[in-house]
Image: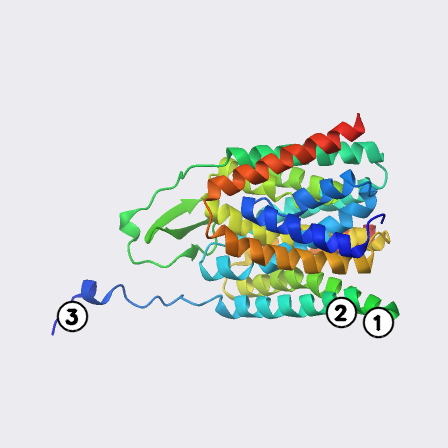
Amino acid sequence: MTVAPLVVLVLALACAFGGSLGGIGGATLLVPVLLALGVDPLAAAPVGLVTVAAGSLASASRPLQDGLVHHRLGLTVELAASSGAVAGALASTAVPEVWLARVLGVAALVGAVAALARRGVRNRPDPTFHGETTGEWPGTLGGQYALDGRIVPYHARNLPGGLAASLVAGVVAGLSGVGGGFLKTPAMSEVMKVPVKVAAATTTFTLGITATTGLVVYGEQGRIDPHDAAAALIGAIAGGLLGARVQARIHATTARRVTGGLLLVVAAVVLGRTL
Amino acid sequence: MTSDPSATGPPPDPKAGRFDALAAALRRVLLVVAVLAGLGALLPGSAGRAAAWAAIVVLMATPLVRVGWLGRRWFRRGDPRFGLVAVGVLAVVAVAALLG
């Protein structure tokens, strides 16, 4: 890698902080930034997926305790996402670098649109569910979660559409090293009609699996540099935890706008270098 | 005295705290990964390399152990369809290791 581990640490910290503020994940910022600094896409991708896995682990506890993670739904769509990650990671060594950079640039652009466009509440509280617990319904892709102290029932729809979107997210993750959460969460929310809070929490859980699948292939290909990965891990964990604390104090829309704006700049730089 | 439930709030939730142990375990794993990664970044030579690899391996193993735990739990609770989904996800990772 052309960047020193200390620089990787600082960049991972800054990107994880910014990514968690905007709810898009740090790797969506980190990998394009590494490319903009001249790092080879094949070396940047493993660093990105390490930070994705670290972010998934660092933010795992709270949504679990709040009953927001739908494990059955998560693993169902993860079948497609992990398969896509394997295909993407295997193909990444055969794809020309300029095309990998273009995939990343487009991914950053999509991430920017996702960050800037996300809004609204579709599922509403149902008074007949008063006093019930939150969580998933066994044997189904449905469940219920708490919104403003009231219970909101939901059920995932359009499973084929959700699986297709997850497959694409997995391919992008395996090819480029970004997590694909900026694709998975909107897919679950907009295509499968799952409440965005549940979609985001479930995606956070599944991103760790997608990243691990991609890293298994990268590891077999000898593309993981342990020192760079360790530096990125520390930065991602620290930045993610710090970002989660600050996120609770600032307006979510403002955070998403700032992150979306940053991603637009990064996408312009990365795509501009490939022209 | 009255036994009006509205005066005392909803009845105790029998499922409350069912993922507390998992959440606590994940927090401990995060600490272990952070310490190992810190050693990997600070220690020179093969010791640092070993610590960094250990951090990566623990990081990668954690979601897979969680999937295995969920699958076992679903099989034991009479939800074999999703138990098989969990097995399928682990099979994809195994295929990744074989094809990589």
The alpha-carbon separation of the residues under discs 1 and 2 comes to: 8 Å
Point 60% across, 44% down: residue: A181
Mark 1 sits on what residue?
B47
The residue closer to the viewer here, A175 or A138, is A175
Mark with earlier residue (1, 2) = 2
Mark with earlier residue (3, 2) = 3
Residue B60: x %, y % from top left: 71, 60
Secondary structure found at label 1: helix
Q: Disc 1 residue type?
A: Ala
Q: Nearer the viewer, mark 3 or mark 2?
A: 2
The alpha-carbon separation of the residues under discs 3 and 1 comes to: 64 Å
Q: Disc 2 residue type?
A: Leu
Q: Indicate the quadrant where residue A39 lies.
A: top right
Say if A183 sits above or below A240 in the image: above
Residue A227: x %, y % from top left: 81, 60
- Circles 1 and 2: CB distance less than 8 Å? yes
Secondary structure found at label 3: loop
Numbered mark located on residue B3 in the image: 3
The alpha-carbon separation of the residues under discs 3 and 2 comes to: 58 Å
Numbered mark located on residue A139 in the image: none
Mark 2 sits on what residue?
B39
Q: Are marks 3 and 1 on the same chain?
A: yes
- Circles 3 and 2: CB distance less than 8 Å? no
- Left or right: residue A124 versus residue A253 is left
Tag 2 subunit = B
